[in-house]
Image (cartoon, coloured by chain):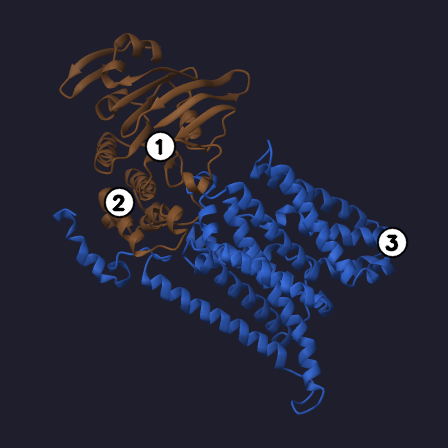
Chain colours: A blue, B brown
């Protein structure tokens, strides 16, 4: 290059991250170091809180034969948190990337509305006994299948052929979701208070809703889907640049979009059926992970989002159960504090 | 060579583009000019397979753009649209690095890094390569986008109004860069331009469009005629001989 560039080399050399001419997922080495420190800290925090939930305040002494069964029972909740954190974080980050919009969540596609509609509908039409007996693997997988079918219809109809419009699909998703929500709201109004109480416990997301019976099937599905998503990271990096740029780089946009939306549908359907709706959680996790991982690369974004999600869930449960001795529904607390943290982050950063 | 045969695009009953028939030869800069709504961008997008045509056939280097695998076309042709907006914050170098995707699929090799550096230096973005795009001025950002498509190392480069929102100095600088890229790297540029005089000064060929049809195609001297341009732009346009070739006065 011409000599006019030479004065800049000393300034670049001041920051070791800028000296070498290579393309990194992070702007500077400093950002990268900060990322790894944050990731390790958050994973450590999540792990510590999980261990705390497992072992702390165990009613029986360590040497008692019933110590292990207590831990095993608590393990179910930890696994549920793991699944919820994985599903929500990966699904939301991927969803925001393919839609090119960072203020929406996959809940917009109506999974949670459909879930509460199914639950309310069973209670309304078939009564409390039916709702209680609507559990077990077949009921669980029926729900998951219904949610996936709903999204497949939505994608198939609105993303291919002459409509081929992502925003139209989101709009229809929101309208379907709102419609289902008002229908279930209407039915809920006509329930007896005792029935309503029983229903309400299912409609607020909680890891205590999780049933270990589903784990043998749910865990492999979630692991395979998230692993697939992780392997698609490089393609997601390109898809997040939008349809035109992705096509220019030879990535078949429509096909990849539908593939990723189907994977998102699987993750959201599984977690919603397992522990109920956590509308704001994925959004909060994604938002925080963009701040903690200043990079375009989904490989790093996914890991950070999961670490944040798991840390939030486990610490929230630990603090509520063992420090505040309260059994308040955690999702309510997460949404309250999540909303606050979100506002603070936005007001400080002034950007998404 | 870019061959367009009977390409048509209908935007409803009123607005019809085509049938277009043209053969744009290899190498050099071809400028697409014409009034608003003449179909310049539509034509460019159809060549760049970002817009499906309703009828006809377009081949670039003998590859049919509608049937060739998109990944293969990405090594032959690239297109840059007017508006680019990304949700993620990207540095100039990261953006340019994306241009290597058709080859590296996201794993940049040493050779990729060398090519990225080459085009960043070429567009005089060396000092800015670790800046985020939102920390750049309009002209610098536009150069960064051009660096991205040049990194794709395609024979054919289509640019939709690359001078949009640039001042005179930035526009001249951009056109000098493109001219130099055409000469040095033997690339074929097809560029939508609004300013006839920029086309006259920097293009090797001009394709004038009007009402969804190709009105004229030829060398700068052949197109820079007062009657022809006045007719195309429906405005009185005179041509005077300037120090660097013909100049349109309107």
* Circle number at residue B119: 2
Q: CA distance from mark 1 to mark 2?
A: 17 Å
Disc 1 on helix, strand or loop?
Answer: strand
- Residue placed most toward the observer, B57 or A122: B57
Are labels 1 and 2 on one chain?
A: yes
Q: Quadrant of residue A19?
A: bottom left
Residue A331 location in percent, x, y? Answer: 64, 62
Q: CA distance from mark 2 to mark 3?
A: 68 Å
| Residue depicted at 21% across the width and 37% down the height | B184
| Residue depicted at 68% across the width and 60% down the height | A205
| Residue depicted at 62% across the width and 70% down the height | A317
Q: Dots 3 and 1: beta carbons under 8 Å?
A: no
Left or right of B14 on screen, residue B147:
left
Q: Tell me, yes or no, if residue B148 can be seen here.
A: yes
Residue B158 location in percent, x, y? Answer: 35, 32
In the picture of the structure, the residue carrying the numbered disc 3 is A126
Left or right of A254 on screen, residue A212:
right
């Amino acid at each position: 290059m011409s000599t006019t560039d030479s004065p800049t080399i000393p300034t670049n050399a001041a920051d070791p991250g800028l000296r070498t001419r290579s393309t990194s997922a992070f702007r500077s080495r400093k950002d990268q170091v900060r990322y790894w420190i944050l990731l390790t800290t958050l994973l450590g925090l999540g792990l510590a809180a999980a261990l705390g939930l497992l072992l702390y305040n165990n009613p029986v002494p360590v040497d008692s034969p019933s110590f292990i069964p207590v831990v095993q029972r608590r393990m179910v909740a930890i696994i549920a948190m793991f699944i919820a954190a994985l599903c929500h974080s990966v699904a939301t980050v991927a969803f925001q990337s393919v839609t090119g919009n960072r203020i929406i969540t996959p809940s917009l596609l109506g999974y949670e509305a459909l879930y509460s509609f199914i639950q309310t509908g069973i209670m309304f039409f078939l009564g409390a006994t039916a709702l209680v007996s609507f559990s077990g693997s077949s009921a669980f997988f029926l729900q998951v299948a219904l949610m996936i079918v709903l999204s497949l219809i939505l994608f198939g109809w609105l993303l291919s052929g002459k409509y081929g419009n992502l925003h139209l699909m989101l709009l229809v998703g929101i309208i379907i979701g709102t419609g289902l929500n008002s229908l279930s709201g209407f039915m809920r109004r006509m329930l007896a208070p005792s029935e309503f109480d029983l229903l309400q416990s299912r409609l607020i997301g909680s890891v205590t809703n999780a049933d270990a019976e589903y784990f043998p099937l749910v865990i492999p599905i979630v692991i395979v889907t998230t692993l697939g998503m992780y392997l698609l990271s490089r393609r997601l990096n390109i898809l997040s640049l939008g349809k035109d740029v992705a096509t220019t780089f030879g990535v078949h946009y429509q096909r990849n979009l539908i593939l990723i939306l189907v994977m998102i549908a699987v993750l959201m359907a599984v977690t919603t059926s397992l522990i109920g709706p956590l509308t704001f959680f994925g959004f909060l996790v994604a938002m925080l992970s963009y701040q903690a991982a200043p990079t375009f690369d989904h490989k790093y974004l996914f890991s950070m989002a999961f670490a944040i999600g798991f840390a939030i869930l486990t610490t929230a449960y630990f603090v509520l159960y063992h420090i505040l001795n309260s059994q308040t529904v955690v999702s309510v607390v997460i949404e309250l504090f999540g909303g606050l943290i979100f506002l603070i982050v936005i007001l400080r950063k002034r950007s998404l | 060579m870019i061959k367009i045969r009977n390409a048509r695009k209908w935007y409803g009953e009123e607005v019809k583009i085509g049938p277009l028939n043209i053969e744009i030869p290899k190498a050099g800069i071809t400028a697409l000019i014409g009034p608003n709504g003449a179909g310049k961008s539509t034509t460019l997008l159809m060549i760049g397979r970002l817009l499906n045509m309703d009828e006809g056939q377009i081949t670039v280097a003998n590859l049919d753009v509608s049937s060739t695998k998109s990944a293969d076309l990405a090594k032959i042709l690239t297109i840059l649209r007017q508006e680019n907006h990304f949700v993620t914050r990207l540095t100039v170098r990261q953006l340019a690095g994306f241009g290597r995707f058709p080859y590296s699929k996201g794993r940049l090799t040493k050779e990729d890094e060398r090519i990225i550096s080459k085009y960043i230096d070429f567009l005089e973005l060396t000092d800015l390569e670790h800046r985020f795009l939102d920390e750049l001025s309009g002209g610098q950002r536009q150069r960064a986008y051009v660096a991205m498509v040049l990194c794709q190392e395609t024979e054919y480069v289509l640019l939709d109004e690359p001078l949009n929102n640039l001042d005179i100095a930035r526009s001249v600088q951009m056109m000098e860069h493109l001219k130099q890229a055409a000469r040095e790297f033997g690339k074929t540029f097809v560029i939508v331009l609004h300013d006839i005089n920029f086309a006259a000064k920097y293009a090797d060929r001009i394709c004038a469009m009007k009402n969804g049809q190709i009105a004229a195609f030829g060398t700068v001297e052949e197109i820079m005629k007062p009657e022809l341009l006045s007719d195309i732009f429906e405005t009185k346009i005179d041509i005077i001989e300037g120090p660097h070739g013909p100049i349109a006065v309107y």
